[in-house]
Image (cartoon, rainbow, N blue to C red):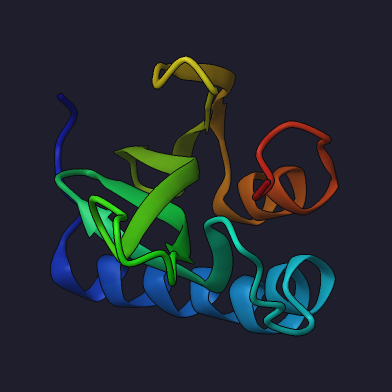
C-alpha cells in the first residue's frame, strides 16, 4: 500500500478526476439510463480507497430476488505513488487489479483512462 496524498493534492486530484467523469466517461459510457430485466448501470462515479482514486460503475437491479438492489463495480484506479506520479490499474472481470501503466503524471494518467481500451466501464 502506497502513501496517501497530502490533502491539498488530494483535492486537486479529485477535481481532475471528477472533470474526466463529467466531461468524458459519463457522456461516452452512460448517456442515458436504460432499465433492463438484469442489473443495469445507473451511474459512473469515483471515490478514494486508501491511496487510490477508484472509478466505479454503479448498477441497479429491479429484480425483487436480487441479493443487492444496488452495487458498485470498479473499473479503473489511479494509485498515488508520489507528487504527480501515479499507477493506472484496470479492474479485470476476475476481480483482480492489473497495473497497466506505472509512474505517469496525473495528466497522462487521465488521458490513458480516456483513450486506452481497457480501463473503461462495461
Residue placed most toward the observer, 58 or 19: 58
Above or below for 34 versus 89 = below
Residue placed most toward the observer, 112 or 8: 112
Picture residue at 58% right of the left edge, 66% below the top: 41
Above or below for 61 versus 101 = below
**Residue 23 placed where, x, y %?**
74, 82
Q: Within the image, what quadrant is residue 69 found in?
A: bottom left
Q: How many marks?
A: 0
**Residue 73 placed where, x, y %?**
42, 47
Q: Within the image, what quadrant is residue 51 found in?
A: top left
Q: Within the image, what quadrant is residue 27 found in?
A: bottom right
12 relative to 76 in the view: left or right: left
Above or below for 56 versus 14 = above
Picture residue at 77% right of the left edge, 72% below the top: 24
**Residue 20 placed where, x, y %?**
65, 71
Above or below for 106 versus 80 = below
Q: In which quarter of the image is the N terminus?
A: top left
34 relative to 5 in the view: left or right: right
Residue placed most toward the observer, 28 or 36: 36
Picture residue at 54% right of the left edge, 23% below the top: 93
Outermost residue, front side: 65
Picture residue at 44% right of the left edge, 68% below the top: 60
**Residue 12 placed where, x, y %?**
39, 75
Amino acid at each position: 500500500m502506497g502513501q496517501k496524498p497530502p490533502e491539498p493534492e488530494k483535492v486537486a486530484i479529485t477535481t481532475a478526476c471528477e472533470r474526466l467523469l463529467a466531461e468524458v466517461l459519463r457522456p461516452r459510457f452512460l448517456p442515458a439510463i436504460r432499465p433492463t430485466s438484469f442489473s443495469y448501470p445507473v451511474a459512473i462515479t469515483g471515490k478514494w480507497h486508501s491511496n487510490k482514486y477508484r472509478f466505479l460503475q454503479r448498477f441497479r437491479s429491479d429484480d425483487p430476488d436480487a441479493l443487492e438492489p444496488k452495487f458498485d463495480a470498479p473499473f479503473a484506479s489511479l494509485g498515488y505513488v508520489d507528487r504527480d506520479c501515479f499507477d493506472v490499474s484496470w479492474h479485470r472481470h476476475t476481480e483482480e487489479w492489473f497495473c497497466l501503466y506505472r509512474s505517469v503524471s496525473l495528466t497522462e494518467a487521465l488521458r490513458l483512462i480516456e483513450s486506452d481500451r481497457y480501463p473503461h466501464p462495461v
